[in-house]
Image (cartoon, grey):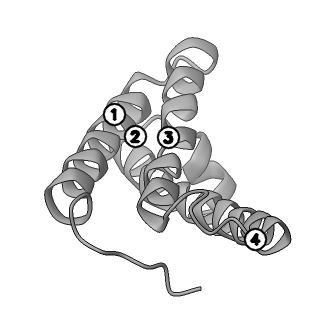
Amino acid sequence: MNLRKLLRSNTYLTGILIGIISPIPTIAILALLFRLIMHLTGNHTFIDDRGILLLGIVPDILLIRYFLIKANDEKTARSLVFVTAVLVILFFMFIHNQPFNLPF
């Protein structure tokens, strides 16, 4: 199956894949950006890695709106809501109160 065709289909699998994959580049970009800001300013209490992980979920929320309003792909949006909720629950269960550092 072609990747473009898969991403345009209104299936639960599409939403799950998008929901899992979309936070990864966002977390990487935010981590590099905040590390650069901390290095340039010398302020090492700007934001910790747990905050970056939580901000990485923002694209999922924006994609939910896109798939519900613009694309009218209800199954994809439902699975995105499910994956986002699971990610938030896992964050607050395992990472929120623990010391955590990103590997980069």
Tell me the residue that label 1 is attached to: 81
Q: In the displayed image of the protein, which residue is found farthest to the top? A: 69
Q: How many marks?
A: 4
Look at the numbered disc 3 and give the secondary structure of its residue.
Answer: helix
Q: Answer left or right for 30 relative to 49.
A: right
Which mark is drawn over residue 11? 2
Name the image quarter holding residue 27: bottom right
Q: Say which label, 4 or 3, has the lower sequence index.
A: 4
Q: CA distance from mark 4 to mark 1?
A: 38 Å
Q: Position of residue 101 (x, y in %)?
A: 43, 79
Q: CA distance from mark 3 to mark 2?
A: 16 Å
Tell me the residue that label 4 is attached to: 42
Q: CA distance from mark 4 to mark 2?
A: 47 Å
Q: Nearer the viewer, mark 3 or mark 2?
A: 3
Tell me the residue that label 3 is attached to: 60
Proximity of marks 1 and 3: CB atoms separated by less than 8 Å: no
Front position in the image: 57 or 16:
57
Name the image quarter holding residue 63: top right
Q: Residues within 10 Å of mark 4 (few under 14, many from 20)?
A: few
Residue at 21% in and 51% down: 92
Q: Amino acid at mark 2?
A: Thr
